[in-house]
Image (spheres, helix red, strand yellow):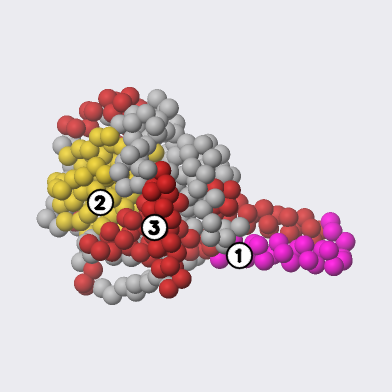
Amino acid sequence: MPAIKLEHWWIRVFDFVRLQAFVISLLVLGIGEIFMENSILKFVTLGALLISAVAQAIQIFPYTILAKKQVVACKAPESKNMVSLFVSNVLMYNSKTEAVKQQIAEAEPDIILMLETNEYWAKSMSYLKEKYPYTVECPLENTYGMLFYSRLELSDTQLRFLISDEIPSIFTKVKTPSGKEFEFYGIHPKPPVPQESESSLERDTELILVGKEIAKRKKPSVVAGDLNDVAWSYTTRLFQKTGNLRDPRKGRGFFSTYHANYWFFRWPLDHIFHTDSFDLVHMERMKNIGSDHFPIYVILNYTDPLEREFIKDELTEEEKEDVEDKLEALEEVMEEQK
């Protein structure tokens, strides 16, 4: 189903469950081998299951510890070049603010991005302004509010609405203690689920627009947020290739952040991507805070990319066409809405 390049939610939902499909395929293979009598039906059924399991394994393998790391571990981190980020979808209806406050106090991140924040969360987190003088606050009651706090100097800070007047995103330039500058994008696109959007088009195009902007600006960049998409989906791969972004998850594990309450139905929705200007110092999925998402905490070390060689993962001609098709489709939808 995920191989079908349509944006309908009931197709795109199969992007999410590859790990679960892999596990279930193996279980049913074992049961079938034990209990099914030898026949053409058994051969065809178990053969199809094996093909399915292999297909899922190919997709999720890069996010296992057996795969090659896409982001190298920093061997000599420097405090003046390190940037720590705490990203949390807090769940707007969650009132357990103390759990979040405790994790922030323990981690002491340089940058905090909180999603699904309303006025209640804005008031509860207002104390952070004492230590984090650079802030962007956009509390909303529609589950797309954002709170952004930084103790690193910001400039050219913008609250933007790339796709919809109801869905904010953040762009800003951030200066490290050493004086080096990078650009930060905080995003939270709509998920392809019936109660939000029956199509993944808005989500897909928001990611692609950010990727194209990063590619055009050619600046060291970090993208963080709840992308409402799994790391191994076709859309996320397009997004990564478009912006030449790297995923610190690759080669280290899934770091699945959703759903916090159901261990078998978990997948990586909350992400931190970055250009090749950074090495990884630390990456951690934090403890449950009462939300349906776990927070994620990452420490990056700014490294001059000119000192190393990276292989750029270029878009194929077919992928370039898919990118343009999505952008054109969104323009048509927005024109119809007018």
**61 left or right of 139 in image:** right
Residue found at x 26% / y 39%: 148
Q: For the C terminus, give its image quadrant.
A: top left
- Residue 97 drawn above or below residue 235: above
From the top left corner, tell me how far across and down residue 268 is, in percent: 46, 50
**Which label's residue is closer to the chain start, 3 or 1?**
1
**257 left or right of 299 in image:** right
Name the kind of residue labelled 1 in the image. Answer: Ala
Q: Is residue 26 visible?
A: yes
Separation of marks 2 and 3 at Cα, in angstroms: 23 Å
Separation of marks 3 and 1 at Cα, in angstroms: 29 Å
Residue found at x 21% / y 72%: 306
Q: Residues within 10 Å of mark 1 (few under 14, many from 20)?
A: some
Name the kind of residue labelled 3 in the image. Answer: Leu
Q: Residues within 10 Å of mark 2 (few under 14, many from 20)?
A: many
From the top left corner, tell me how far across and down residue 34 is, in percent: 81, 58
Q: Which residue is mark 2?
A: 184
Q: Which residue is mark 3?
A: 327
Separation of marks 1 and 2 at Cα, in angstroms: 35 Å
Q: Name the front one of labels 3 and 1.
A: 3
| Helix, strand or loop under label 3 | helix
> In terms of depth relative to the viewer, which is nearer, 31 or 243?
243
Residue found at x 74% / y 58%: 30
Label drawn at residue 55: 1
Name the kind of residue labelled 2 in the image. Answer: Phe
Residue found at x 78% / y 66%: 44
Q: Which residues are magenta?
A: 35-58
Q: Is residue 36 magenta?
A: yes
